[in-house]
Amino acid sequence: MKTIGLIGGMSWESTVPYYQIINRTVKERLGGLHSAKVVLVSVDFHEIEALMRAGSWDRLGDELGEAAIRAEAAGAEMLLLCTNTMHRVAPQVEARVRIPLLHIVDPTAREIRRRGLTRVGLLATRFTMEEGFYRDRLARKHGIEALVPATGDRDEIHRIIFDELCLGRVLGSSRDEYLRIARGLLERGAEGIVLGCTEIGMLIADGDLSAPFFDTTSLHATAAALLSTDDAVAGLAVP
């Protein structure tokens, strides 16, 4: 079994499900008392968020690159950024380590394509919805178009993430707003909805929408657990 390196704390509210999902998946796959081998490097989100607001992306790349180095030094054999937005600096992080980084877009896109979809709505932070790093990877690498809400709705999605979800506040009124915005994207032609911020799964549950939704936290963590156990599963096979 390979050791998974998590760079978390962005926010810690969404890092907790990563640990739970990874361990649950390993247990289901290997049985018995098996649990995941995990290295967690957790950053102070107060400092990270201030740099995001200031647009200091080079500094953020350095900060998370240093976190990646610490995870690798502690024995991690693969790396996950437990956040969608900070994949804005994924190339800088990858350049600082020898171990592979599992990009959050890729397992999400594979599940979208497995469901036969090519156009999705994207709910995320303003950075993820408005900058090209996320939507461009979906389109260029996976042939998936991502629609984003109108400006006012993008502002409200962003506000709820930082003022509520990152603080552990889950409000019914905010759930209603997200579902209203998601339905608007479906009316514009989206075939499903990507929960493109790792906190949004706290707010929207399976069955809340008539269309498929794709929880990036769950898909990212599950993919890591499966990758980490591939050799172990092969070793259990009977010749």
Image (cartoon, rainbow, N blue to C red):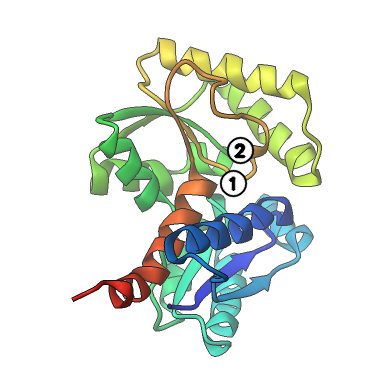
| Residue 197 vertical position relative to residue 100 in the rendered view, above or below | above
Look at 37% across and 66% down and name the residue there. Answer: 227
Q: Nearer the viewer, residue 92 or 194?
A: 194
Q: Amino acid at mark 2?
A: Gly
Q: Secondary structure at mark 1?
A: loop
Lateral position of residue 103 relative to residue 74, left or right: left
Q: Name the residue rendered at 50%, 13% in the picture.
A: 184
Is residue 136 in view from this perspective?
A: no
Work out which residue is located at the far bottom of the displayed protein and give it.
73
Which residue is tagged 1?
198
User: Element under label 2?
Assistant: helix
Mark 2 burial class by Cα count in 10 Å: few <14, some 14-19, many 20+:
many
Labels 1 and 2 touching (C-beta < 8 A)? yes
The tag on residue 201 is 2
Residue visible at 76% across and 21% down? 172
- Residue 93 percent coordinates (x, y): 48, 72
Which quadrant of the rendered structure holds the N terminus?
bottom left
Asked whether 140 or 78 is in front, the reply is 78
Residue 197 image offset from top left, x and y in percent: 57, 43
Query: Which numbered marker is on residue 173?
Result: none
